[in-house]
Image (spheres, helix red, strand yellow):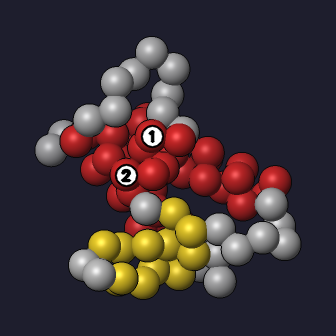
Amino acid sequence: MKYGKEVEAWYKEAVTRSLHEHPGSLLVFTACDVAQKFAPPKRMVGCQEVDAAAHALEQLARNGLLCSHKIKGELRYLND
């Protein structure tokens, strides 16, 4: 699915902000949860938003901010 890079950047910023706001807490993210919890204003959450959230989480994992784990077939990202 195609999504805008600005939506991916929105989710990346939202997750990063959440990590900074809860530095001592274990946070677990899934693409679906991120898409719903941090949805841009006036935007319905659908496949494109979930894809953008997934790419944002993957990028944060590649940058070392999150660790990815596959649990029961679903990718989860933790601030391990």
Q: Residue at x 34, y 32 (%)?
A: 45
Q: CA distance from mark 1 to mark 2?
A: 6 Å
Quadrant that contains the C terminus: bottom right
Tag 1: residue type? Gln
Whether 48 is drawn above or below 32: the answer is: above
Q: Residue furthest top?
A: 42
> Is any atom of residue 44 visible in this view?
yes
Q: Are marks 1 and 2 in contact (CB under 8 Å)?
A: yes
Mark 2: which secondary structure?
helix
Of the pair 59 and 69, the residue shown nearer to us: 69
Q: Report the disc number at residue 32.
A: 2
Q: Residue at x 42, y 43 (%)?
A: 35
Picture coordinates of residue 75, whole percent (x, y): 35, 73
Q: Residue furthest left?
A: 1
Say which quarter of the image contains residue 54.
Answer: bottom left
Q: Report the disc number at residue 36.
A: 1
Of the pair 61 and 37, the residue shown nearer to us: 37
Q: Residue at x 80, y 60 (%)?
A: 22
Q: Residues within 10 Å of mark 1 (few under 14, many from 20)?
A: some
> Is any atom of residue 9 visible in this view?
no
Quadrant that contains the N terminus: top left
Tag 2: residue type? Cys
In-image side of 9 versus 26 (left or right): left
Callout count:
2
